[in-house]
Image (tube, rainbow, N blue to C red):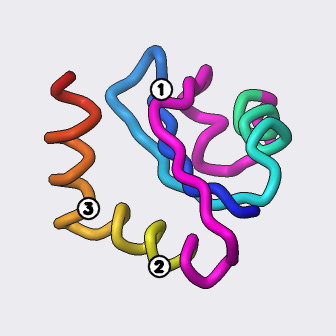
Amino acid sequence: MYFVYVLKSKNFRKTYVGITDNIERRINQHNNGDSFYTKRFLPWVIVHKEEFNDRIDARKREKYLKSSAGRKYLRKTIFEN
């Protein structure tokens, strides 16, 4: 199983979209400062996740969510609620 996830910084107006096969481990890595980008905007909370059977489909979804259309989708469906 693979997950595409969206994080939101508690203290800054920043989001992060990523992919992993172990969601708990990856969130801990982000909040422990193990990632270059995310360590600057600690702490992070997960606001959305999607599950996929294979990495190829998960990667396609991640790329979409990082695109302009994907960011608009996230704003409308997740961040406006």
Q: How far apart are marks 1 and 2 (CA)?
A: 24 Å
Q: Quadrant of the N terminus?
A: bottom right
**Residue 41 placed where, x, y %?**
54, 30
Secondary structure at numbered mark 2: helix
Q: Relative to residue 79, is residue 32 drawn left or right?
A: right
Q: Is mark 1 on a helix, strand or loop?
A: strand
Q: Which of marks 3 and 1 is nearer the N terminus?
A: 1
**Pointer 3: what residue?**
70
**Nearer the N terminus, badge 2 or badge 3?**
2
Q: Residue at point 55% right, 48% down?
A: 5
Amino acid type indicated by mark 2: Lys
Examine the rendered structure and indicate whether residue 31 appears above or below residue 70.
Answer: above
Query: Where does label 2 land, which residue?
Result: 60
- Marks 3 and 1: which is nearer the front? 3
**Span of residues in magenta:** 32-58
Residue ranking furthest to the top: 11
Seen in the picture, residue 55 relative to 11 is either above or below; the reply is below
Query: Which residue is identified by label 1?
Result: 9
Q: From the viewer's perspective, is residue 27 above or below residue 5?
A: above
Of mark 1 and mark 2, the one earlier in the sequence is 1
